[in-house]
Amino acid sequence: MVLNNIQIGLIQFIITCCFFYIEALLHFNIGKTGGKLCCKFPKLKDNLKIICIIATFASLSTIATYLIKKKLSNNDNNDNNNNENDNPVI
């Protein structure tokens, strides 16, 4: 199965959100319990804030990765085209 850029970006976004949410929960619980490691969920309002912040930065990360990959792919294609033009067929 070949994945297109949208599918790859969606996978990256979901995985980033999941891992960052777990990290945010750990930080939230450490801050609320004074350093004890536990797993209590924040109130709905706080939870939504956390999820929105994570989703925003995961989106920015996904978009930046896509743009960098696209730029590097274009540079590789241009380099290959230039190399072909440098060696004329005799």
Image: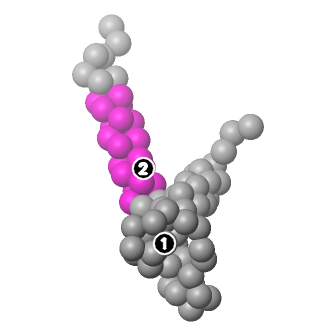
Q: Quadrant of the N terminus?
A: top right
Residue 57 drawn at (x, y percent): 43, 70
Residue 87 drawn at (x, y percent): 28, 16
Residue 70 circle label: 2
The residues colored magenta run 63-82
Q: Is residue 63 above or below residue 43?
A: above
Residue 86 drawn at (x, y percent): 25, 22
Graded by Cα atoms within 10 Å as few (under 14), some (14 to 19) or many (20 or more), the crowding at tag 1 reads some
For discs 1 and 2, the disc positioned in front in the rendered view: 1
Q: In terms of image quadrants, where is residue 9?
A: bottom right
SS of the residue under disc 2: helix
Residue situated furthest right in the rendering:
1
In the foreground, 62 or 54: 54
Question: Which color mode does the image show?
Answer: one colour
Residue 13 seen in render: no
Q: Is residue 83 above or below residue 20?
A: above
In the foreground, 66 or 34: 34
The verdict on residue 77 being magenta is yes
Seen at 58% across and 61% down, the residue is 18
In the displayed structure, does residue 82 sit left or right of residue 9?
A: left
Q: Quadrant of the C terminus?
A: top left
- The amino acid type of the residue labelled 2 equals Lys
Residue 90 seen in render: yes
Residue 12 circle label: none
In the foreground, 7 or 87: 7
Seen at 53% across and 57% down, the residue is 19
- Residue that numbered label 1 is attached to: 29
Residue 29 drawn at (x, y percent): 48, 72
In the foreground, 62 or 45: 45
- The amino acid type of the residue labelled 1 equals Asn
Q: In terms of image quadrants, where is residue 38?
A: bottom right
